[in-house]
Image: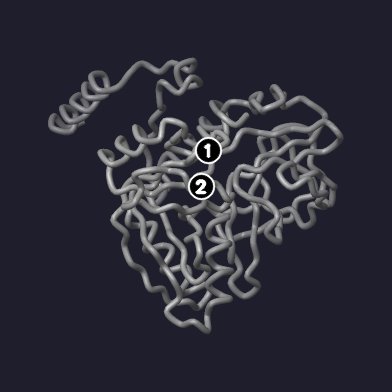
Amino acid sequence: LDADVHQGLIDDIELLDEAGDEFDMEKVKRGELTPMFFGSAMTNFGVKPFLEEFLRMAPKPQPRKCLEGVVEPTSDQFTSFVFKIQANMNPQHHDRIVFMRICSGKFEKGMTVTHRQSGKTLRLMQPQQFLATERTIVEDAYPGDIIGVFDNGTMGVGDTLYSGKKKVTFKDFPTFPPELFARIRAKDSMKRKQFLKGMTQLAQEGAVQIYENLGSMESYIVGAVGQLQFEVLEYRLKHEYGVDLEMNRLPYTVARWIQTNGHDYKELKNIDSAMIVKDHKQRVVLLIANEWQTNSIVERNPEFTFCTTPDQLKIEEE
C-alpha cells in the first residue's frame, strides 16, 4: 500500500479499537450491544457476508409471555401476534392486510383460529409473504415466520390469534403518549362517509391516536408524537380516500387516561381548561395544557387514578 493509504487504514483500525466494543454474543442477545456491518447495497459490496452472518447470529424463536403464562415456540398449539396493519396496499381494491408473527405451532393455509379480543372464529385464507412489491401465497409457516392475511376490520394491532380451546392473550404493544393534538374534519361534508372510513382504518393501523370528540361525530381529535404524523394522516386521507382535511391545532400537550375507581368521570374538578375525550376503546382521556396544570388536576382529584398511557390502565384494571 502507498504510505498515505496505509496510514488511513491504521487510523481507521485505531478508531474502531477506541470507539467500538469487543464483540460479545451474550451482550447482543441481552440488547446491550449492537453488531455493526459495513458495506454498500448500491455496489453490492459486503451484502452477501452480511446476510450470511445475520442468519448465523439471529436468535431462534423465543418463549413469549402472555397473561396466562408463557408460550413456548415448540408448543403444538398455534398462536400468533398481530403487530402491523396496512390498508390500501392495493389501492384498486382497498384491501386491508394484517401482519402477524407466528409464536408457536404450525400455520396451515385455510386453518380456523380464534380471535382472542372478539372471541370470533376466523378462517385465515390467502396467507401471503412479502418481498419488496412481490407477494407470494404460502401454504404453511412456522414460529418466527411473518405472514399477512386479509381482514375486514375484526383484528387490531396487538391482538392474539390461537387454535384449540386453551386461551392465549399476548400482552399489547406499549403506547407512546401524544404531545401534539389537533381537531380534524372533512372540508366537504359530502365526503363524510369516506372520512369516517379512512379515520377508522388509520386508527386501527396505529398511524395516529384518534379520540372521539364527545357530542360530535363530524370531527375527531387526533394525537401525535410528532408533526410528521399529522402530515402522513393528511396525505393518506387525500390520496387513498379522496378526503381533504380541515385541521386546527389544539393547545394541549398532555394526555392522561382516567381510571374512575367507581366514580363518574363527570365529577372531575378543576378541568375547565382541559378537554374530555374517549379513545378508540371508549376509555376516558383528559387532554391538558401543560404539566403544571396536570399536577394541579391530580391534586384536586385524589379519588381518580391518572395514567400516562393506557397500558398502565390495563395493568391496574387486571
In this rendering, is residue 73 above or below 277?
above
Q: Amino acid at mark 1?
A: Thr
Q: Is residue 51 visible?
A: no
Q: Nearer the viewer, residue 277 or 209?
A: 277
The quarter of the displayed image where residue 126 is located: bottom right
In this rendering, is residue 210 above or below 189?
above
The label on residue 260 is: 1
Q: Residue furthest left?
A: 4
Q: Residue at x 47, y 41 (%)?
A: 257
**SS type, badge 1:** loop
Q: Nearer the viewer, residue 152 or 249?
A: 249
In this rendering, is residue 208 above or below 198?
above
Mark 2 nearby-residue class (10 Å; few <14, some 14–19, many ≥20) = some
Is 283 positioned to the left or the right of 222 in the image? right
Q: Which residue is mark 2?
A: 284
Q: Quadrant of the C terminus?
A: top right
Q: Could you tell which of marks 2 and 1 lies nearer the N-terminus?
A: 1
| Residues at marks 2 and 1 touching, judged by CB atoms closer than 8 Å | yes
Q: Amino acid at mark 2?
A: Val
Is 254 positioned to the left or the right of 169 in the image? left
Q: Nearer the viewer, residue 128 or 299?
A: 299
Q: CA distance from mark 2 to mark 1?
A: 9 Å
Q: Nearer the viewer, mark 2 or mark 1?
A: 1
Q: Is residue 284 visible?
A: yes
Q: Nearer the viewer, residue 247 or 112?
A: 247
The quarter of the displayed image where residue 117 is located: top right
**SS type, badge 2:** strand
